[in-house]
Structure formats: C-alpha cells, structure tokens
Image: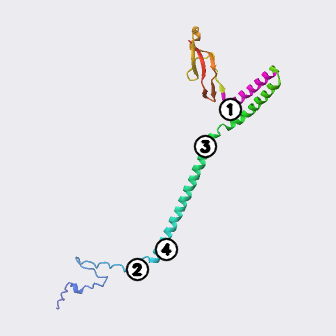
Amino acid sequence: MQEPEATLPPTEESVDPNNSSSTPEAGIPETPAQPQDPSTLEVNTPLENEEQSIDYQKEMEEWKDKYLRLASDFDNFRKRSQKEKSELIKYAGEDLIKSLLPVVDDFDRSLLVMEKSDNVSALKEGIQMISHKFRQLLINKGLKPMDSLQQSFNSEYHEAITTVPGPEELKGVVIDEVEKGYFLEDKVLRYAKVIVGA
C-alpha cells in the first residue's frame, strides 16, 4: 500500500503579493498607500488668483462706499437735529406771543381813545375788558391763580415776607397777600408772597 505524500507549509516565496485573494501571514506589514499624484490636485493658476484678488478689491470698495454714505447720512442727521433743537429753544414762546398780539392791539386802541376822550367811565370799562381778555388767554395756556388768603401757610406754595401778631386762630394763617402766586398746570410757576399771622 502506497503512503500519502507529506505536504509542506507554503514559504514566503510561494505567497503571491499581487494576489488580493491571498491572506498575508501575521507579522508581515501591509503595503503602504501610494501618495496622490500631484497632477490630480486642484491648484489655482496665477490668472485665477488675480481674478479673486480683483473680486476682493471690488467688494472692499463697495463696503467702503457704503460706510462713507452711512457716515455722511448720520452727520447730516446730527446737524439737522441740532438745528431743529436750536430753533425749538429760540422760538419756544412763538405760540404764546402770537396769542398775546390781540391784547397788545387792544391796549394800543385804548391809548388812542385816552388821548381823544375824557370819558373816564368808558376808559375804565375798556381797560377792564382788556384785563379780562388777557387773563382768560393765560388761563387757556394753563395758568392758574393760587388761592392763598385765609389758607394755612405752606412753604411749598408761599413765601413769607413778614409775620404779624394776631389772635390765636390766625397763627400760621395767611392774612395778607403782597404778590399773587400762580401755577402752570400743576407746577408752581411763582410762589405767593404773603404775610402770616403769628
């Protein structure tokens, strides 16, 4: 009977390195990756670089132009605001002065009548009418007279000129008014100058 031939393990020379189906032995390093072909890399040409530089320059000029326009608009706005504020302060009393002109006209007419007439009663009536018209105009503008007589002295509204001795019930009470006080809406426009009982 014939004995089978013994098979030897494959040697390094018997392993085909180009055969992808063959498994490399343990400890044998794999073939390193080949570097990429430089011809396949995307490289900008000098012409492309120049075109990009031109584009960046145009974009920078556009932003510079926008900035200059914005700065100019802001400067114009600032100057216009300052002018409007100055005019507002300068002509703040324009409406009041305009509303007072009819009263001035009435005074002028009264003065002309006084030069030609000796009728004191008519002149007195005319002056009273002008006074009423003038006061009503001021009330319409927010002026309110302050009632101080027979009121308790209040330093927030009154300015004591002097004190006068009096009965107990008049101590700390305004007994006379030297100069009338006024409000402008709810603000004290002028303090009343008063005489207070002591």
Q: Secondary structure at mark 2?
A: helix
Q: Which residue is mark 3?
A: 86
Which residue corresponds to the image point at 61% horizontal and 40% vertical from the top-left?
A: 89
Measured as percent of width and height from the top left, residue 176 is found at: 63, 15
What range of the chain is rendered magenta?
Answer: 122-143
Q: Secondary structure at mark 3?
A: helix
Q: Going from the N terminus, do you reach mark 2 or mark 1 first?
A: 2
Q: Secondary structure at mark 1?
A: loop
Furthest residue in direction front, as rendered: 115
**Foreground disc of the pair 4, 3:** 3
Q: Which residue is mark 2?
A: 40
- Judged left or right of residue 194, residue 124 is right
Judge whether residue 142 is colored magenta: yes
Which residue corresponds to the image point at 47% horizontal and 71% vertical from the top-left?
A: 53
Q: Going from the N terminus, do you reach mark 4 or mark 3 first?
A: 4
Q: Where, by quadrant of the figure, is residue 157 drawn?
A: top right
Q: Which residue is mark 4?
A: 51
Measured as percent of width and height from the top left, residue 50 is found at: 47, 74
Q: Relative to 172, say whether 115 is above or below.
A: below
3D distance between C-alphas at marks 4 and 3: 53 Å
Q: Which residue is mark 1?
A: 141
